[in-house]
Each structure stands twice: as structure tokens, then as C-alpha cells.
Image (cartoon, rainbow, N blue to C red):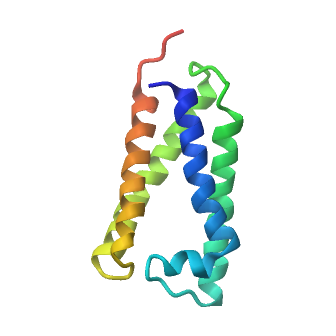
Amino acid sequence: MKLKTFSIIWSILYIGFGLGLLVIPVQFMSTYGVTLDTNGTLMTRILGAALMAFALTFYSNRNIASTDKGWHNLLLTSLIYNIVDIPIVLKATLDGVMNSMGWVPVGLHIFLAATFGYFTFKKRQV
């Protein structure tokens, strides 16, 4: 597996979710059975902006050598974010806060955590 390839994959995933949450938050979240009030719309847009920043960060760093120390820090923080988010999204899905589409972000966070974990702890070749 190549870090550059996954950087592009991560960028695409984050931009897809980020744009949806930022531009059309009410419609995007209704896909998951979640109804937003004005406060929820605000928070959803903030999350969308953060995910867009993730997308830009991974895409702009795709050509940096995997041995660069900055990569380790970025991968580790992304791993932690996804590990923390898994039980939150899982509980929301199991409790019926989100409909069965809630399994999509659950699976996505598991995929992201697994791939970030792989590259975080993979032995770096100089």
C-alpha cells in the first residue's frame, strides 16, 4: 500500500462528506434520518469545514516522503480522531438516532482508523 494513494483516497472521502455537511447540511443529514435545527445546522457546517481541511491537508501532502516526521503526526492525530468517533457514531446508529444509513459512517470510520493505523505504525524505510 502506498501512502500517496491513500492520501488521495482519504482526500476524496473527506471532501465528499465535508462538502455535504458544509453546503447542504440539512439534506445531507436527513439521509441518515437526522433532523437538524439551526443549532445543529451550525455545528454540522463546522464539522464540514473541518473535514474539508482534512481533505486539503491530505491532498496537499500526498507527494511528501513517508519518512517525513510531519506525516507521523498527521496520521496519528487522524487515527485518534477516527477511533474516538467510532463509538459515538456506533451508539447513535444502535440507539436509532441515525437510521440504517448510520452504518456507512461507522464503516467509514473503521476503514479510516485501520488505514491510518497501518501507516502510523508501519516501519518507515529511509
Q: Could you tell whether 52 is left or right of 10 in the image?
A: right
Above or below, 119 relative to 58 = above
Residue at 39% in and 47% down: 111
Residue 81's spot in the image, x, y percent?
Answer: 48, 53
- The one of 98 and 121 positioned closer to us in this rendering: 98
Q: Position of residue 60 (x, y in %)?
A: 71, 36
Image location (x, y in percent) of residue 65:
62, 20
Tell me where residue 38 sits by quadrant: bottom right
> Quarter of the image containing the N terminus?
top left
- Residue 124 in picture, x, y percent from top left: 48, 17
Residue that sits furthest to the bottom in the current view: 37
- Farthest left residue in view: 94
- Residue at 38% x, 70% y: name it: 102
**Count of numbered circles in the view:** 0
Nearest the eye: 99 or 75: 99
Which residue ends up furthest to the top in the rendered image? 126
Quadrant of the rendered image containing residue 11: top right
Q: Residue at x 46, y 44 (%)?
A: 79
Quadrant in which the C terminus is drawn = top right
Compared to residue 32, the image places residue 35 above or below, namely below
